[in-house]
Image (cartoon, rainbow, N blue to C red):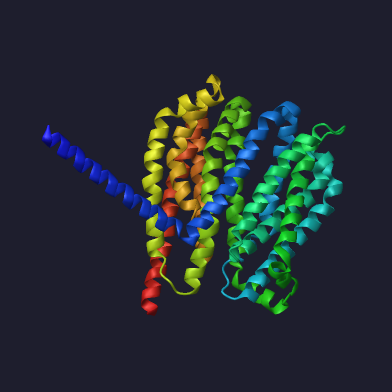
Amino acid sequence: MQIKLKKFAYLQIFLYLCTRKMEKFISKIWQSPSVRNVGKLLSANVLAQVIGFIIYPILTRLYSPEDFGLLNLFCSIGGALILLATLEWYNAIVLPAREPEARAVVHLSLIATFALTILLALSIPFAKPIAGLFNSPQLASYYWLMPLYVLLMALWNILNYWYIRHKEYGRISGYQISQSTLSAAFKTSFAWLPFSGGLMYAAILSPLCSLMLSIKLAGSKLLKPLLSVDKEECRQAAVKYANFPKYSTPRTLINYIVGQLPVFILTPLFGTRLVGFWGMALMLAFVPMSTISRALYQVFYQKTTEWVNTGMSIRLFYRKFSLYTVAVVIPFFILLGIFLPQITAWLLGAEWRTVGEYIRWMLPWLTFNILGSSISYLPDLFFKQKIGLLFEILLAVSRIIGVGIGIAMNSFEIAIAGYAIGSAIVNCIQYLWFLSLVRKYEMTLQESR
């Protein structure tokens, strides 16, 4: 009996020491500005996503499936055009050590955006033939909104990275929350108006109002310096950051288009029902993951750039990030994988059990996606966009092969599994390449000392 009491006392002491150590560890972590900034962005992203999810059961009763389909087509086309709008120069806004050079990159992004907006405006008279390419005559009625949509979203991308450069994470959070709230309000209220297209108009007005509000609150101190344009600085910046339009733009376009591959190829072959399950699986799996990785990306990008510009070591930071992420994600995903079909059946209904089975195939891909997406700025930081483009091509080939195997075997499940497995393999190799970039930087840093 005494031995058991002693063991129990030792266990209590051990648990107490572990608890105290964990409290100190959490307190130490939270004192880090980077962690607080991630928390600020993450909480805003989560709140914005929650608002969007809550409103959808209402919207599906106010709008028809055709309305949502038209909105998805409009935003999908716009998404590709937004990637072209700034020629990826906005990603370089964080990089310059000098403020005049950063302003020049902003001006380059704006010039490219306005140029594409003008071209889109000139294409409005051809709205019907363009809509015919997508077999959607209804698109012609709203195509005139496309230039405005692309302009607004591209301007936010530029302003977003200007905020990141100046550590204005609260402004980014404010935009995300206001945009999500206004979108929900506009979509709901426009459904009662005596004209159609409420979802389309809400897609324009919500970012417009949020962008104007953000500019108003930012004030002259943060934005007034952007009014001064130095042509020579712009010319030099265009040469220095030429890799962004040359390699980053094709890379992001390939990534975007290949990301839509199952929808484009498998719908005609297997029907909309199975593709609907796949779309739901993507939404349930990637919306939470992308929310986390986007917050980490924005904070890590600014912080790493600051360290590199001042010649500081970054190896320990990435080692800790990798270890902590793996330690949290892998056990969680293993546990989640066991119960996924039951969870989706309970959450969505019995017929949606297939969604959980699809997500199971995606878990390895999700793991490397979380690790890689959070630090995918490293090729931009070290001017390795050309190799980054090669990885996107490799990812596209692996996905096409995976989907092709499923088509050859006349199996939607094998096509999806091949797509996910191919993505996981390439993302794993790409992540190892990211870490090699860190090692090479450290070696260069040691040699310079």
- 303 versus 211 height, above or below: below
- Residue 353 against residue 70 in the figure, above or below: above
Up-down relation of residue 46 to residue 439 (above or below): above
Left or right placement of residue 183 versus residue 138 in this view: left
Image quarter for residue 335? Answer: top left
The reply, left or right, for residue 196 in relation to residue 401 is right
Q: Residue at x 71, y 39 (%)?
A: 184
Q: In the depicted view, which residue is nearer to us: 14 or 302?
A: 14
Along the line of sight, the residue nearer the viewer: 202 or 392: 202
Residue 315 drawn at (x, y percent): 39, 64
Which x, y percent locates residue 337? Answer: 41, 32
Q: Is residue 264 left or right of residue 223?
A: left
Measured along the vertical axis of the image, is residue 233 above or below residue 280? Answer: below
Residue at the extreme top: 350
Q: Please say whether residue 292 is visible from this viewpoint.
A: yes
User: What residue is rendered at 45% in x and 29% in y?
Assistant: 340
Q: Residue at x 76, y 49 (%)?
A: 149
Report if residue 384 is visible in the image: no
Task: Please state, as top left, top right, bottom left or bottom right, where the C terminus lies in the image.
Answer: bottom left
Q: How many marks?
A: 0
**Residue shown at the point (72%, 42%) measured from the top left:** 183
**Percent position of residue 8, x then y:** 20, 37
Left or right of 204, for residue 346: left
Quarter of the figure with the N terminus: top left
Q: Residue 412 placed where, x, y %?
A: 52, 28
Q: Which residue is at the front of the view, 312 or 54?
A: 54
